[in-house]
Image: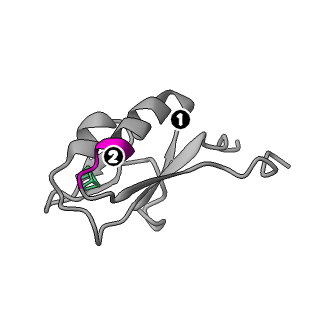
Amino acid sequence: MTTPEPAARLHIDWTRCDGRGLCAELLPGALSRDDWGYPLAAAGRVRASADQSTVPLAGTELGAALDAVKLCPTLALRLVRPHPSSGPQ
Ligand code: SF4
């Protein structure tokens, strides 16, 4: 079984984040928070050994992700869309 290509990825810059959790409230299925309040990939969203600050998103999550990027008070979020030529091989 192959994992479908995500519609986009949300990158969290933890060096900018203040850990208040607005983004995790907007994207409860994609983000959870660590013991200090910093957002990271929700359980099962990425492999445990993978980068927890780059979170694959479904198409249905793009609107909320765009809101999170716009509303993040520290500009710590960035939406990364797949390159148009990087479709399934
Ligand atoms: S909205 Fe921005 S500052 Fe707030 S927890 Fe999310 S990434 Fe951090």
| x then y, percent, for residue 2 | 70, 44
Q: Quadrant of residue 5?
A: top right
Q: Is residue 75 above or below residue 61?
A: below
| x then y, percent, for residue 58 | 53, 35
Q: Is residue 17 above or below residue 3?
A: below
Bin the neighbour count of mark 1 within 10 Å (Cα to Cα): few under 14, some 14-19, many 20 and up.
few
Q: Residue at label 1?
A: 58
The outermost residue toward the top is 60
Q: Is residue 55 visible?
A: yes
Q: Which mark, residue 31?
A: 2
Q: Of helix, strand and loop, which mostly describes the magenta segment?
A: helix
Residue at 14%, 60% in the rendered image: 35
Q: What range is drawn magenta here?
A: 69-73
Q: Secondary structure at mark 2?
A: strand
Q: Secondary structure at mark 1?
A: loop
The outermost residue toward the right is 89
Bin the neighbour count of mark 2 within 10 Å (Cα to Cα): few under 14, some 14-19, many 20 and up.
many
- Tell whether position 1 is magenta: no
Q: Quadrant of residue 26?
A: top left
Which is nearer the eye, 88 or 13? Answer: 13
User: The disc labelled 1 sits on which kind of residue?
Assistant: Ala
The earlier-in-sequence mark between 2 and 1 is 2
| x then y, percent, for residue 42 | 35, 47
Within 8 Å of ligand 1, the CB of disc 2? yes
Residue at 41%, 39% in the rendered image: 65
Which is nearer the eye, 4 or 16? Answer: 16
